[in-house]
Image (spheres, rainbow, N blue to C red):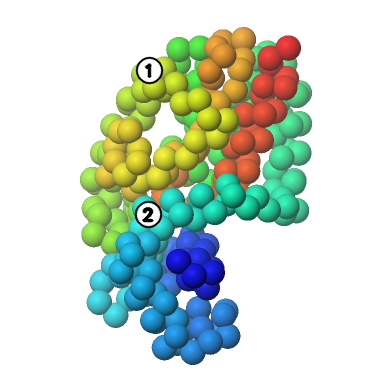
Amino acid sequence: MTLRQQNILSAIVEQYAEVAVPVGSSLLAKVFKVSSATIRAEMAELERCGFIMQPHTSAGRIPTDKGYRLYVNTINDNPAVPSLPERRGERALASRVQNAGAPERMIRNAVDTLVELTHNLGLATIGNQLYISGLSNLFGQPEFMNGMHGYTSQNNVQQVAQLLDNLEPWLREAAPNEPLSVYIGQENPIGRAAGCSLIISRFRSPFSDRSYIGTLGPTRQSYRDVMTLVSRAGQELEEVLYV
């Protein structure tokens, strides 16, 4: 993949996350200051390689799970300096964790703060239980309200429910060991057709050396922001709780 193709893919991911409609060549031509024909040729190659797709004739393009995975891997390889909103979010997380009092309240506050900041569903393990907050955020997304790009909203909701029903035992059995793990769409262990991404951070707590906090949202989301905040939530909880 050329650098320009990688940049075009990143632009499609980020624009689609913001507006929830397929991204067309004319918009990208203005961004990259080249002709629409040049952008269409690059998009055709990205589509041939499976990184983007055209949901219907005459539409722009949207990322595939494979495209999101490449984008996320690029973020991991090239971490950016946190933006002002990200720094504010990190400060809010720190304040609400440190001022919560009891360990369980600290974890709940961190989850609730993630919900407010990411507009995703937030979750965390507290002992052998899974704390969930923000269901209305998740089901308020276009993917679940109206159905998008060949998925029915009912099917998506059922798949999300299956994922949530089985998430706590899966976390206990699989015990992901990375500080930050990202499961995109079909990569999810359960509910693969839900059109969701699970972003979780492992941290040590009085409840377990492998506690988890994270978010569940549509595959169409601002990965850089959410990954930064989830990672920071795990770090903050470990610093306060594991002493």
Local secondary structure at mark 1: helix
Residue at position x 31%, y 44% in the image: 186
**Residue type indicated by callout 1:** Glu
Q: Nearer the viewer, residue 44 or 144?
A: 44
Q: Nearer the viewer, residue 171 or 22?
A: 171
From this view, report whether residue 33 is shown above or below residue 154.
below
User: Where, quadrant-wise, is the C terminus in this rendering?
Assistant: top right
Residue at position x 31%, y 59% in the image: 148
Q: Which residue is mark 1?
A: 173
Residue at position x 50%, y 35% in the image: 181
One can see residue 242 in this view: yes
From this view, report whether residue 60 is shown above or below residue 19.
below
The image shows residue 20 at horizontal and vertical percentages of 43, 63
Q: Nearer the viewer, residue 104 or 11?
A: 11
First reached walking from the N terminus: tag 2 or tag 1? 2
Residue at position x 74%, y 46% in the image: 87
Q: Nearer the viewer, residue 22 or 131?
A: 22
The image shows residue 24 at horizontal and vertical percentages of 42, 77
From this view, report whether residue 183 is shown above or below residue 20.
above
- What is the crowding at mark 1: few (fewer than 14 residues within 10 Å), some, or many (at least 20)? few
Relative to 23, 54 lies left or right: left
**Residue type indicated by callout 2:** Lys
Indicate which disc residue 66 carries.
2
Q: Are marks 2 and 1 in contact (CB under 8 Å)?
A: no
- What is the crowding at mark 2: few (fewer than 14 residues within 10 Å), some, or many (at least 20)? some
Q: How many marks on residues?
A: 2
User: Where, quadrant-wise, is the N terminus in this rendering?
Assistant: bottom left
